[in-house]
Image (cartoon, rainbow, N blue to C red):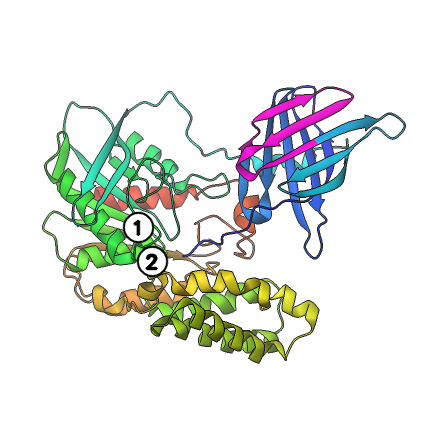
Amino acid sequence: MKKIIFGVLILISIKAVSQNSDLIFFKGNILASPDSIEIIISLEDSNSAYLFVPEQFLYKMQSADTYYDKDSLYCSFKKISANFSGKRIEETNVFSGIWTQGQAKLKTELEITDNSEFDFLDRPQTPQPPFPYLEKEICVENIKGNSTLCGTLTIPDTLKSYPLLILITGSGAQDRNEEIAGHKPFMVIADFLTKNGIAVFRYDDRGVGKSKGDFINSTTYDFMTDAQAVLNYFSNFPNIDNKNIGVLGHSEGGLIAFMLAAKKPKNLNYIISLAGPGVAIKDLLMQQFIDINKSLGYTDEHIEILSKMQSELLSLTKKNMSLAKLRKEIKGIYDKYSQYFSEEEIQKYKIGDASINTAVMQLSSPWMKYFINIKPQKYLRKIKCTVFAMNGSNDLQVNMKDNLGEIKNNIKSKNGLVVNYYDGLNHMFQNSETGEISEYYKIKTSIEPYVLEHILEFITHRR
């Protein structure tokens, strides 16, 4: 579902980790009060530095300017207006310098140590060229939505016609690969399926990457019209079997697939839902809130209080009010519930004045106002095409039991429904220990291979 968005101010103390003469890792913690955050910097050579921030899901941001030798280090990251400049202290073999970001400056020390802990940064499933299939850049205009969707078509060859699968991303501004924490699951899916005889089209969300359109003021319905425009575009396309076209949606993309299928388009033959919601969205968001907070180790007592607060905040989306009025309402709710917590807990749970701007932005967005009122059941009951729905037991964002249960109870398609429950998989369909969101970054696998096999099997053997 909606992906967590973090700020980009990074004030740090760094410890460097050396692997060999060609690759050096620098690891450390942000020490700016009141937060602490782990960061990693890698040097592939004296002119290339990359920044990793696991907690913020920032993966391999390349430096704009880098200089490194045995006595000094400089690297800058223009995307976050930050740079580090330091000198090596010979007696301690520690680099000492200043990290600058915006107006902030912090003395920083970098100690060279061992690097064996960094293999989790590998993304071994990410496909690498040359590819044994054709790739074509295609842009599709959605006149109804005033948007243009640009993406990549992968197709085995141009010798015959192939089934086509259209991929629909989850919540948040997503690129065609649905990239998160260095993982590119949609690229992995497209590569695997195309190598096995299935054409795949994946596209950037409107307003993202090469696509055009207004993302900020768009709703789930608007994104559905984008998917519908893509579907219509490929219904009469060279080397595509127009009687074998389906859509696959992940998370909110699964909901979009349900909404699209409920319109009963004749050119849609099947849909695949990866962790798509089946329960009413407000209920889903509340369960998501509880499950994630439990994974963070919050006490049951605090979760109960915070859940009541969250429910009141979400209810504000149903009211039409000015931003000033909304800000006042949010502050009133924060003040009401902050009495149950210490000052330290108020900062920990982000229910103080510093969080009001974020809450105003989220609760006033057209997307949230529309999204929270969606009841997927009304769409599920209208679906007539074949459906494959799957979820993992460690999914903390879309509860497996509740949502697959509602999908089973409401889809009555005579063309068939396949439901797969996966033990141990998280929201990204990675094998996980707990399902915590922080695990996404530290798991090397982008999507479990047997999930890919099941998708292929469904497409090739569906009724």
Residue 320: image location, x then y, percent: 33, 72
Q: Mark 1 and mark 2: span between their CA atoms?
A: 7 Å
Relative to residue 253, is residue 159 depicted above or below?
above
Indicate which disc, 1 or 2, sits on the residue closer to the N terminus: 1
* Three-letter amino acid code at the position of disc 1: Gly
Q: What is the quadrant of the N terminus in the image?
A: bottom left
Q: Nearer the viewer, residue 432 or 112?
A: 112
Within the magenta stretch, is there residue 67? yes
Residue at label 2?
Answer: 276
Residue 387: image location, x then y, percent: 23, 55
* Three-letter amino acid code at the position of disc 2: Gly
Q: Is residue 350 something one can see in this rendering?
A: no
Residue at label 1?
Answer: 249
Do tag 1 and tag 2 residues touch (Cβ < 8 Å)? yes
Quadrant position of residue 121: top right
Residue 334: image location, x then y, percent: 55, 74
Seen at 64% across and 69% down, the residue is: 346
Seen at 24% across and 53% down, the residue is: 224
Quadrant position of residue 82: top right
Relative placement, left or right, of 76 versus 123 is right
What secondary structure is found at the residue carrying circle 2? Answer: loop
What secondary structure is found at the residue carrying circle 1? Answer: strand
Seen at 45% across and 53% down, the residue is: 3
Q: Which residues are magenta?
A: 61-84
